[in-house]
């Protein structure tokens, strides 16, 4: 029996969410609906503009893999997370949030620097546009990886955002190899259409010959497969993953369990913020697989969890909401 259900690795970022208009995005020259890497000065410029508009902000520890691991932990999984934050206020905030969720982290002392931050701009259509300053998270390397924890985990979960940093990509490749040598299954999130479009070679390097499980949305699937229809994308992804999940927004998801395709219905809700929906789906689904729950039921649970999180602002539910979802489905 392995100690951890899921070991996650990714960019450790403190998220600041703000409600904006499409006109604000145009005025700030922000690309809508995708993640854009920016420097610290650009992020400060955006915040200055937004503070002038006096738009209320909320803050949370984030990053794609971080969100997924926190979700899995709150659902009841035993989880470990490797990221890199600095010895600053944001870094201590991040680590406190992780530990409060019951997630284990490497014991190494925090280093001087600036913790990465993601400015998430939410428009009235619930779309999120992310502007990310990686800060010290860009320096994530093999030093932040715990080989023993990887070997003692059922799943290693990697976010493709790591491909933007040379040391992060190398760490992801090394971690994947460690996992495969120790019987730990490898799950990879495609993370963002822009990542797949601009860093496809690096993503394929992280994957190696094949991974056990891929998470992506339809746009990412099309970008990876370089096709524009779902059946063709499915066939391409089968070549690189034994199993996969393609989320379809309000329409639900398509899951391949290694033998057959399973259609998961969406849960009808009024979405106000789609930030973290895919991360929540992955966290819920990985929790289910690690508990021996089948793909059909796991997909239904993950769809319900993702639907719940888009009805509020921020990527997180309350501790009671996580417990309530598990109780509703499995008790």
Image (cartoon, rainbow, N blue to C red):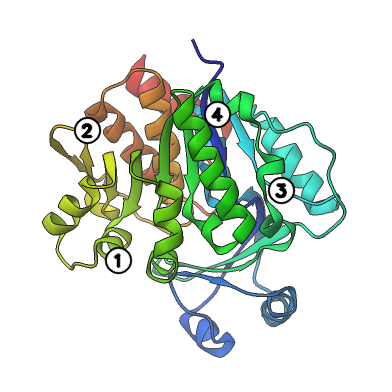
Q: Which residue is mark 1?
A: 223
Return the x and y of residue 161 as percentages of the image width and height: 52, 57
Question: In whole angstroms, how far apart are the C-alphas of marks 3 and 1?
Answer: 29 Å
Question: In whole angstroms, how far apart are the C-alphas of marks 1 and 2?
Answer: 22 Å
- If you read the primary sequence from the N terminus, does the residue marked by circle 3 or circle 2 appear first? 3
Circle 4 packing at 10 Å, graded few (<14), some (14-19), many (20+), is many
Q: Secondary structure at mark 3?
A: loop
Q: Secondary structure at mark 1?
A: helix
Return the x and y of residue 196 as percentages of the image width and height: 39, 64
- If you read the primary sequence from the N terminus, does the residue marked by circle 2 or circle 4 appear first? 4
> Residue, x 75% and y 50% (percent of image)?
85
- In this view, 190 is above or below 200: above
Q: Secondary structure at mark 2?
A: loop
Q: Specify whether 288 is left or right of 184.
A: left
Give the farthest residue toward the top. 1
Q: Which residue is mark 2?
A: 257
* Rendered image: mark on residue 84: 3
Question: In whole angstroms, how far apart are the C-alphas of marks 4 and 3?
Answer: 19 Å
């Amino acid at each position: 029996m392995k100690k951890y259900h899921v070991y996650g690795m990714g960019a450790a970022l403190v998220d600041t969410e703000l409600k904006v208009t499409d006109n604000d995005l145009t005025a700030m020259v922000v690309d809508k609906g995708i993640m854009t890497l920016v420097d610290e000065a650009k992020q400060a410029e955006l915040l200055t503009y937004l503070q002038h508009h006096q738009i209320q902000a909320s803050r949370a520890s984030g990053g794609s893999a971080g969100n997924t691991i926190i979700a899995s932990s709150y659902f009841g999984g035993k989880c470990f997370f490797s990221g890199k934050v600095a010895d600053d206020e944001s870094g201590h905030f991040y680590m406190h949030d992780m530990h409060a969720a019951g997630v284990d982290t490497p014991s190494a002392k925090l280093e001087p620097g600036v913790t990465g931050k993601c400015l998430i701009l939410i428009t009235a259509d619930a779309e999120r546009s992310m502007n990310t300053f990686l800060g010290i998270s860009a320096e994530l390397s093999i030093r932040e990886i715990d080989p023993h924890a990887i070997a003692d985990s059922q799943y290693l979960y990697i976010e493709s955002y790591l491909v933007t940093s040379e040391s992060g990509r190398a760490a992801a490749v090394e971690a994947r190899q460690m996992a495969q040598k120790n019987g730990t299954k490898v799950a990879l999130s495609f993370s963002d259409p822009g990542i797949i479009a601009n860093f496809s070679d690096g993503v394929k390097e992280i994957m190696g010959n094949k991974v056990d499980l891929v998470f992506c949305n339809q746009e990412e699937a099309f970008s990876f497969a370089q096709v524009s229809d779902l059946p063709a994308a499915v066939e391409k992804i089968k070549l690189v993953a034994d199993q996969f999940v393609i989320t379809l927004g309000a329409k639900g998801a398509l899951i391949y369990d290694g033998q057959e395709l399973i259609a998961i219905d969406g849960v009808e809700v009024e979405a106000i913020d789609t930030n973290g929906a895919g991360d929540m789906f992955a966290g819920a689904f990985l929790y289910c697989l690690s508990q021996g729950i089948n793909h059909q039921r796991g997909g239904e649970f993950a769809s319900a969890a993702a639907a719940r999180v888009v009805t509020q602002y921020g990527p997180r539910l309350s501790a009671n909401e996580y417990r309530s979802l598990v109780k509703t489905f499995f008790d």
